[in-house]
Amino acid sequence: MPFQPILPTWLAINACNDTSASGMTDLRTGAPVNAGGLNQGDYFDLTNEEANNASYKTNGILYSGRYRRVQVDSGATASNVKTGTIGLMPSLAVVGVNPLGTKNPPMNIVTSWDQSIGGVVRPVVFLNSITPGNFGFVQELGVANVLGKASLTAAAPAIGDLIIGGTSGLVDDPTQSTALTYALEANIIGKAIDLPKANGLFRTLLNLPTVQG
Amino acid sequence: MLTKMIMLFVKRLWLMNFCFLTDPLYNEIDATNLESVRKNVVFDNLFVGTPFQQKLKKAGVLDPFLGGSGMFEGFIYGRPQGQAVSPGSTVTVTRQQQNTGMKFQPKAYVSWVPIDDWELDDGSGTGGVINSGPSLIADQYQIMIETMTLMINTMLEMDSFRHGQASGTNISDNRILNSNGLDEALNNGVDPSPFGNIYATYGGNTRGGVIGPALNSTPLWLGQTAAGASTTSLATNGTGQIDVNALTRLWAQCVVTGGHPDLGITNVFGFTAIVNALDAQRRNTDMKKFDIAYEAVTFNGMEIYADPLAPSALSQDFLSLGQGGGKAGNNNLVDGAGSNSVTGTITTPQYTNAAGANVATSPTGSNFPSNATCTVGEVLYFLETGSFKIRPTNKKGWNFGLRKSPMPNNVSMDALFERLGTNLYNVMPRHCAVALGFSA
C-alpha cells in the first residue's frame, strides 16, 4: 500500500477501534463496507498541527510523525494494546501463503509485545486501546507518547536518554552508561524528548525502521 | 465452566468480525419496511451564524481584491501649517509629510475533504456507486461542500476578532496567515488587547511614531483596577459590570474622533449583560428582528448584535469551542489558526507618564492598571461599518472556488479543496472601540 495523503480517518486518529479496515461495517451482516477510501496499510505523515487537530485528548495529543492503518492480530494480549505501549510483528502464522509459496511478513498486522514473531521486530507505538482483531492506527515514526514501566532502570532519567521497549510493551530508560549489546540495541525505540516517566506517558522521538507494504 | 465457554464463544465471534447475526437475517418487519426518512434534510448541530461578517457585507464594505502585491490603503495623519496672521505679514512656507498608506496582504483560507467516488458522486454524475439512486437519503457530496463553506465562514468570523501579525514583542501568538482582525486594529500600542497582545504597528505603520495616534483605538477596561508593585509582583483583577455609563463612554471614544458607530458586536453572553444594563435604565430592550436571522438591541442609534463566535469567557460552556475536538477530533469550532475566541486573562505592563516615571494607571485613558493580571470576561465592540473592508479576491478559483486534486495512482480518491483568498481590516480604527473586562 503506497503512501496515502488523501484518506478519511472517521474519528480522531487515536480513537479508532474498528471492526473493519475501512472503518465502516454493515449494521445487518457485520461485513466490512469497503468505501470511503480507508484501507489497511494506508500510511501518511502529519505535521504537528495536523496531528494535534486529529487527536482525541483523552488518549493523548499526537505530534508530527508517520501513522499507519493496521489490524491488531486477534491473538494479541488486549491489556498490552493501549496508549503508549509498543507493538511488534506477529508470527507469520497469521498470514496466508503467497502465490509463490512463501509467507509475506505482515507490515500491516501488529500484535502485542508478548505475542511477537520473536525478538523485537517491526516495533510500532499503539495510540489507544484496540480490541484484538480490530483495526486502528499506530505510529511508526516521529514524536510519540510512550508508556514507561513501573520502575525505570536509570537512576536519573533525563531528556535525550535512549529509550528501549520491554515487557508488556512498556518502555524503560536504561542506565545510559551501560555498554551497548546487540540485545539492548535491538530494543531501542528512540530518544526521550520529555523527562522519562515511570508509570506514565512521555514523548519520545522514535528511531524505528521505515517499512513498505 | 459454562460462563467461560460462553465468553470464549463471544470472543470468537468478535475475532471473526461478526456481529450477532439473526437467523434468518431479516425479520418480516425489516424485510418489508423502510425507515421513515425525510429526504435531503440534515440538521446542523455544530455550526452557528456569523452576524459580524453578514452585517459588514450588508453595510457594503465588500471591496473585491483585483490583484497586486498587497492591499494599499492611503490615509492622512498630518496637517499643513496655518495660523491667524496679521494682514501684510510674511510667513515662511514649510511643508511636512501629511499622508502615507497601510498595507495588508491577502490571506488564504482553505477547507478540504477526501472524496471517494466509489462512495459518492462528486457532482460529475460519473461516480457514487453507493450514495445514489432511490435509496439516497442525502447527498454526502453536497453535505461536504456546505460544511466546507461553513468552515471557511467560521474561521473568518473567529479570525475577525483576532489578529494577522507575526509573533514578536508583546505579541505572543503567530497569526501571520490569518486576517488582520479587530484585536490588532482596535489597539494603541500601549494597552493590551482582549487577547493580551500590544500591537505596536497596524497595516505596517508604527503607532505613536511619525503618524502619531492616527491608527490608534484605545481599549476601555471595565474590570477591577488594582495595580501591582512591579512586573514581577502582579495584582489580580476580576471583571466588572457594564452599565450605561460604560456604553456611553465607549460610544464617545468613537465619536470624538469623528466616527459614527453604527454597529455593536458582542458575544451572546456580553449581549445579556448589555441588555440588563439598558433595562436598568429603562431603555428599550425589545430585541426585534433587525435582520432576518439575528436579534439586536439599539443604543445611541447603533444596532448591537449578539455574535456567538465573538470573544467570550462564558460561551465555551455552551458552544463547542474548547481545544480538542472530542473522540471524532472535529466537533469543535476553530479559527484559521486552530484556536478559538475564548477569553482568558491578560497582563498589563508597567505604565509610565510622559516624563518616564512609573504610574499606577495607563496614561491613555484606558483605565488599565499597571502590573496586573486581568480577567477579560466579555468583550464589546462599537464599530463604524464604513471603516471596514472585506477583500475577497475576484478570482473564481479562490473565491469559494473548488480544486479537485486526484491522487494519481489511486483508483477512486481525490482531495477536494474549497478556497478563499481574502482579508478583513479597518482603515479608520479611531472610529471604533472595544470594551473588555465585564461579566455576563
Image: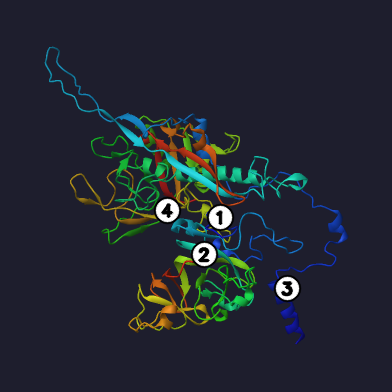
Disc 1 from disc 3: Cα separation? 32 Å
Q: Residues within 10 Å of mark 4 (few under 14, many from 20)?
A: many
Chain letter behind tag 2: A
| Amino acid type, residue under disc 2 in the picture | Gln
Q: Secondary structure at mark 3?
A: helix
Q: Secondary structure at mark 2?
A: loop
**The N terminus of chain B, quarter of image:** bottom right
Q: Badges 3 and 2: C-beta atoms under 8 Å apart?
A: no
Sequence-first tag of 4 and 3: 3
Image coordinates of residue B431 in percent, x first then y, are: 38, 34
Q: Secondary structure at mark 1?
A: loop
Q: From the image, tell me which residue sits under label 2.
A: A212
Residue B13 got which mark? 3
The quadrant in which residue A28 appears is bottom right
**Residue B127 appears anywhere in the view:** yes
Q: Residues within 10 Å of mark 2 (few under 14, many from 20)?
A: few
The quadrant in which residue A156 appears is bottom left
Query: In the shown orientation, is residue B54 left or right of residue A156?
Result: right
Colour scheme shown = rainbow
Same subunit, labels 4 and 2: the answer reads no
- Residue drawn at point x = 31 percent, y = 32 percent: B101
Q: Badges 1 and 3: C-beta atoms under 8 Å apart?
A: no
Residue B239 got which mark? 4
**Residue B282 appears anywhere in the view:** no
Is residue B376 depicted above or below B18 in this figure?
A: above
Sequence-first tag of 4 and 1: 4
Residue furthest bottom in the image: B1
Q: Residues within 10 Å of mark 3 (few under 14, many from 20)?
A: few
Disc 4 from disc 3: Cα separation? 59 Å
Chain letter behind tag 1: B
Same subunit, labels 1 and 3: the answer reads yes
